[in-house]
Amino acid sequence: MTTLRIADRATWSACGPDALDTEPAAAVHAPDLPPGGIRPVPGFDPAVEIGPKGIRSMDRATAFAVAAAGRLLDRAAPADRSRTALVLATTAGSLQTMLDLGTDSLTKPRPHQVDPGRIPVGVMNYAAGQCAIHHRITGPGVILPGGRSAPVLALRYARRLLASGRVDQVLCGASEEATPARAWLEHRTRPATAPTVPIGEGCAMLRLVADTAPGPRITAAATELDCTGDPASALATALRRALATAATDPDEIRTAATTAALDGHHDAETRALTAVLGPAATRLTAHTAIGDTSAAAAAFALLHALDATAPGDAFAVTTLDRRGLAGCLIGRA
């Protein structure tokens, strides 16, 4: 497998820009929000971070992605943008925009009397397109809607792009916005066994290359669908497959970053990790600080694992969503 070296990273979260270990912004509670509220990114101004052009109708998830991509490209050596790819993970794009457009089409005097500037924002690949437009990226661009496991799918896609020789670098990440629409959808569909946590937002993006230079790496990505009603077994299968692909022994894993509790699968995730890795690996959770970031949760968990693992040591990131899709990433810090 072509391993992915993490050349750089950029984040926006409740802890602020490029920070995951500072005090997060307080959760916002309001009558129009479900219990738990939302935990927004503090002080984020698209006009400052991106510029005043082309942001009037832009949703926050897209703005986070455009700003993060800009930071990565600005800090990197000049590169051919036609050989730069962009791969973004999402749940379903801007849910608030979709809901607003649907509401306007039903409540306006005529169904067509919606804000035309909002229509492109409701398209799922809007964020990837805006990143490409703002930063003149003409290489492959894709957005992958995969829920909690979407970052695993995105990193696997990025690996294939680099292995094919089509690109020299990939900007790969996930972005979500905290809005009333998403907060209520998460609240209504969240299993009873899931904890009540604020709905978070932000973006975690990596600049990936396929070279042999020293540095942190993603060495394997695997998924497995639970078709038997045994989510722990599905996650254990994905974990074993990822370990085999990475040529990593289970006892080499020093840190395991978990996300399944957000979908009510804490017990299943714990059983799978204990069965495959044993009890020794340190367990981490990111959502306690930054909130439930849906499709970005595993991307933030990956960065938490990197920060908590000694250089050269191995780590794992696991996902298990309410549909039964299990995912696993293996890497070395």
Image (cartoon, rainbow, N blue to C red):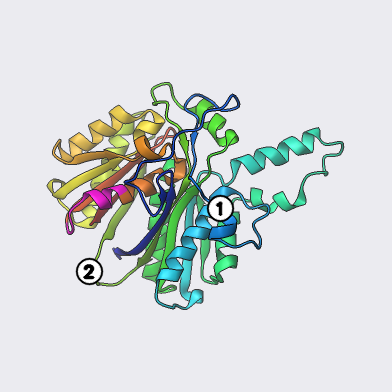
**Residue type at mark 1?**
Asp
The picture quadrant where one finds residue 77 is bottom left
Residue 291: image location, x then y, percent: 42, 37
Q: Is residue 38 above or below residue 117?
A: above
Residue 240: image location, x then y, percent: 23, 46
Identify the residue at image location x=56%, y=61%.
Answer: 50
Identify the residue at image location x=44%, y=77%.
Answer: 79
**Tag 1 and tag 2, C-beta contact below 8 Å:** no
Identify the residue at image location x=27%, y=52%.
Answer: 306
Task: Tell me if I can see residue 241 in this picture.
Answer: no
Drawn side of residue 238 relative to residue 34, left or right: left
Residue situated furthest right in the rendering: 109
Residue 180: image location, x then y, percent: 58, 34
For label 2, count other residues whose C-alpha is less than 10 Å away and answer few (under 14), some (14-19) or many (20+): few
Residue 124: image location, x then y, percent: 59, 50
**Residue type at mark 2?**
Pro
Q: Quadrant of the N terminus?
A: bottom left
User: What kind of element bears circle 1?
Assistant: loop
Which span of residues is magenta-colored? 304-312
User: What kind of element bears circle 2?
Assistant: loop
Which residue carries the number 2 mark?
A: 214
Drawn side of residue 48 relative to residue 242, left or right: right
Does 57 appear in magenta?
Answer: no
For label 1, count other residues whose C-alpha is less than 10 Å away and answer few (under 14), some (14-19) or many (20+): few
Drawn side of residue 319 relative to residue 105, left or right: left
Q: Is residue 176 above or below residue 26?
A: below
Which residue carries the number 1 mark?
A: 45
Q: Quadrant of the C terminus?
A: bottom left
Task: Tell me if I can see residue 252 in this picture.
Answer: yes
Identify the residue at image location x=44%, y=63%.
Answer: 171
